[in-house]
Image (spheres, rainbow, N blue to C red):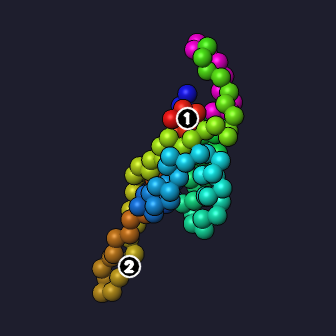
Amino acid sequence: MKKLAISKNVRISPFKAREVARLIQGRPAVEALDMLSLIPRKAARLIEKTLKSAIANAENAEPGKDSSVRPVDRSLLIVKEAVIGEGPTLKRFLPKARGSAGRIRKRTSHIRIAVTDQE
């Protein structure tokens, strides 16, 4: 069973967030949470929040039309994928010398984490 969590329009550059996301892919979810809590970066906090949401989605799965859906113990979960997509860019201008303007691009990201209990 695969469960998903998505955070959209997060104010961090996707390039910076991808460095942290690569570290947790393929690891057990509990180990990935421990690892993220020790990494001193803003991206680690944002990815940790999304990973906690994905774990909660798996633990609190409700059986719907598909009767095979069942809640899962968090120790069995593995981070199947941690994908950082590029979100919309906020464009700003900063005054420069002699009346010109310099462009500033404030990048955003979409964080998508999938956990599964199968390998």
For residue 53, side relative to residue 25 (left or right): right
Instruction: Report which quarter residue 90 is drawn in.
Output: bottom left
Q: For mark 2, what is the residue?
A: 95
Number of numbered labels in the structure image: 2
Residue 119 percent coordinates (x, y): 51, 35
Residue 41 is one of the magenta-drawn residues:
no
Q: Quadrant of the N terminus?
A: top right
Instruction: Report which quarter residue 55 is drawn in.
Output: top right
Q: Residues within 10 Å of mark 1 (few under 14, many from 20)?
A: many
Amino acid beneath label 1: Thr
User: Is residue 96 something that shows in the picture?
Assistant: yes
Per the image, label 1 sits on a secondary structure element best described as strand
> What secondary structure characterizes most of the magenta part?
loop
Residue 63 percent coordinates (x, y): 64, 18
Q: For mark 1, what is the residue?
A: 116
For residue 98, side relative to residue 117 (left or right): left
Magenta part of the protein: which range? 58-66
Which residue occupies 64% across, 37% down? 76
Amino acid beneath label 2: Pro
Q: What distance separates the C-alpha of mark 2 from that of mark 1? A: 49 Å
Sequence-earlier tag: 2 or 1: 2
Disc number at residue 76?
Answer: none
Residue 89 percent coordinates (x, y): 39, 57
For residue 34, side relative to residue 12 (left or right): right
Residue farthest along the front direction in this orientation: 119
Residue 101, compared with residue 24, is above or below; it is below
For residue 92, side relative to residue 117 (left or right): left
Residue 70, compared with residue 49, is above or below; it is above
In front of the other: 12 or 91: 12
Q: Nearer the viewer, mark 2 or mark 1?
A: 1
Residue 57, compared with residue 32, is above or below; it is above
Residue 87 percent coordinates (x, y): 42, 51
